[in-house]
Amino acid sequence: MKAIWNDTVIAESNETVVVENNHYFPADSIKKEFFKESNTHTNCPWKGVASYYTLDVNGKENQDAAWYYPEVSELAKSIKGYVAFWKGVTVTE
């Protein structure tokens, strides 16, 4: 699977985990040069507290377009530290 934004592959892995129709990419599969930590956090009742990244690709930013769960509930342990995308990021094979 590939995550693409602004015509650039920002993550690529054959080992994504699908939860609620989102592909979660292993942390080591993201291209860290395109990711900036965000101060945004949200709470999922069954997964835990999500943290976000802002994407910065070729001079364009996409605020909070990627999220991950640094700590998860027992039910979501398969995605601990994995990264998922939204806000115009295309995930494709």
Image (cartoon, grey):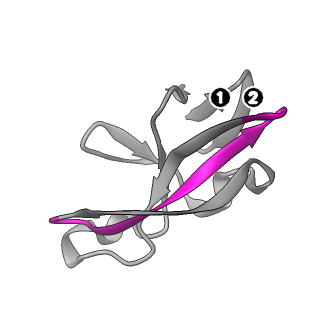
Left or right: 24 as drawn, with respect to 4: left
In this view of the protein, which residue sits in the foreground, 45 or 40?
40
What residue appears at the point 69 percent right and 57 percent down from the top-left corner? 36
| Quadrant the N terminus occupies | top right
Q: Which mark is residue 5?
A: 1
The three-letter code of the residue at mark 2 reads Thr
Q: How crowded is the residue under tag 1: few (<14 C-alpha within 10 Å), some, or many (20+)?
A: many
Q: Which mark is residue 8?
A: 2
Secondary structure beneath disc 2? Answer: strand
| Quadrant the C terminus occupies | top right
Residue 16, relative to residue 7: is it above or below?
below
Secondary structure beneath disc 1? Answer: strand
Residue 80, relative to residue 90: is it above or below?
below
What residue appears at the point 48 percent right and 32 percent down from the top-left corner? 87
Expressed as whole percent of the image width and height from the top left, the position of residue 52 reads 50, 58
The three-letter code of the residue at mark 1 reads Trp
What residue appears at the point 71 percent right and 33 percent down from the top-left corner? 9
Residue range highlighted in magenta: 45-60
